[in-house]
Image (cartoon, grey):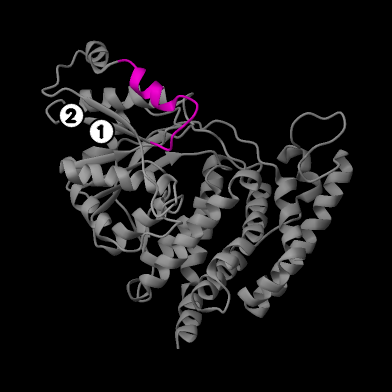
Amino acid sequence: RNAATIGHVVRASQAGLVQYFPDLRPILVNADAGSPDGTQRVVGETEPPDYVEQILLVRPTNRLARVSLTYPELDGVGGKGAALRTLFEMAAALKVEALVVVDSDLRSIVPEWIELLAGPILKGGYDFVAPLYARHKYDGTITNTVTYPVTRALYGHRIRQPIGGDFGVSGDLIRYYLEQESWTPDVSRFGIDIWMTTTALTGGFAVCQTRLGSKIHDPKDPGSDLGPMFRQVVGTLMSMARDNAERWLPITGSHEVPAYGFERYAEPPPLEVNTLRLLSQFHAGSLTSSDTWEKMLRPASYESVMTLAAEAGALAEAAAHKLGITDESGASAGRDGLPSTDELSDTVAAFHFPDDLWARVFYDLLVSANFGGLPAERLVAAFVPVYFGRVGSLVIENRRMSEEQAEEHVERQAREFELLKPYLVKHWNEAAG
């Protein structure tokens, strides 16, 4: 369902293949879920490769081929991971040297992205190329609060965007991916990105990052759009932590990961988040999932989270009353749109979810999901409102910060996950017996 954006992605990808790799045999593939909006038709009708060659004044050795197909589901499950599995199988059959994966809703992709994602593989001998973006301080909340700090603390690599959506992968790593047996239903959906990154790290492959500038794509409000994605990403992260415990348990500290490409200064587009919804859903979770939270979290963590949830509920109610809002969705008589963070700031500014508490409760979840008596899926689903509370706190704290200051906030949180890793190791080993 990306007919509105995929034409630009196709044009930029074609131009990048022709311009930067004129001597290689390029193929562009769209793995589609059977979009009813004409996505596949747009891929086929976008300007032919000879048009790209004319505007770039490049004569490649080989013609660029294009394929658009409907990928098969994996064990009855469709999604991003299932689409990528099809791409991996095609790439392996073609014995490619490098595979570049880009999201189909991108508005900021330029031809150079193809070189930036494939160049480290073809020129530098790397196997996995993760993206480095300039993103709005409210964008990428799952990355900022979970996948970046946890990947850094567990595996010791500071990969800033481990679920960025745009990657470069070597032929060797593609074959390794296809050999793995850890392909769960979550991996067949949005769990695929963290699975790819973690599998590359635990498999000992050479990993780097590449500077892509600003990422502009279809925005998502964490309180209304990211619940299912959170469950799939975190569910995959949990199962991979269990399968790779012997690798990450001894690791202490972290190190920088090489970065390719020229430093870019880009202003990401503005993004508005419904903070009121986040705080309200955090409080609602304490009413519906408190029994699960009590089983999932250690006693001190549970008490602190319940206290914070009650505070979030009271502040959200006060903010809604002040702004004349009738429900947590932001609807109100005579108002258009959502209450902005600035509108809410005076009322909810006191809300603060501490970095160290967030690290402890996530580590509690990690242990409980792998050794507790309840299904991991149930625990992760019950944890979503806690994630909403943490994101709400970050949005409130960052509301008057620059992008650079907000980024330092993310780094501060990541360091807290590293400092508290002994807490995780202790309770993990106790639970493992």
Left or right: 379 in relation to 128? right
The crowd level at tag 1 (other Cα within 10 Å; few <14, some 14-19, many 20+) is many
The magenta stretch spans residue 339: no
Of the image marks 2 and 1, the number of the one nearer the N terminus: 2
Does the CB distance between marks 2 and 1 fall below 8 Å? yes
Magenta span of residues: 32-47
Per the image, the residue denoted by label 2 is 21
Per the image, the residue denoted by label 1 is 115
Left or right: 303 in relation to 240? right
The residues bearing labels 2 and 1 have C-alpha atoms spaced at a distance of: 8 Å
Amino acid on which the number 1 mark rests in the picture: Glu
Q: Is residue 401 above or below residue 60?
A: below
What percent of the width, then of the height, locates residue 132? 39, 43
Q: Residue at x 55, y 65 (%)?
A: 377
Q: Nearer the viewer, residue 41 or 294?
A: 41
Residue 8: mark? none
Q: Nearer the viewer, residue 408 or 227?
A: 227
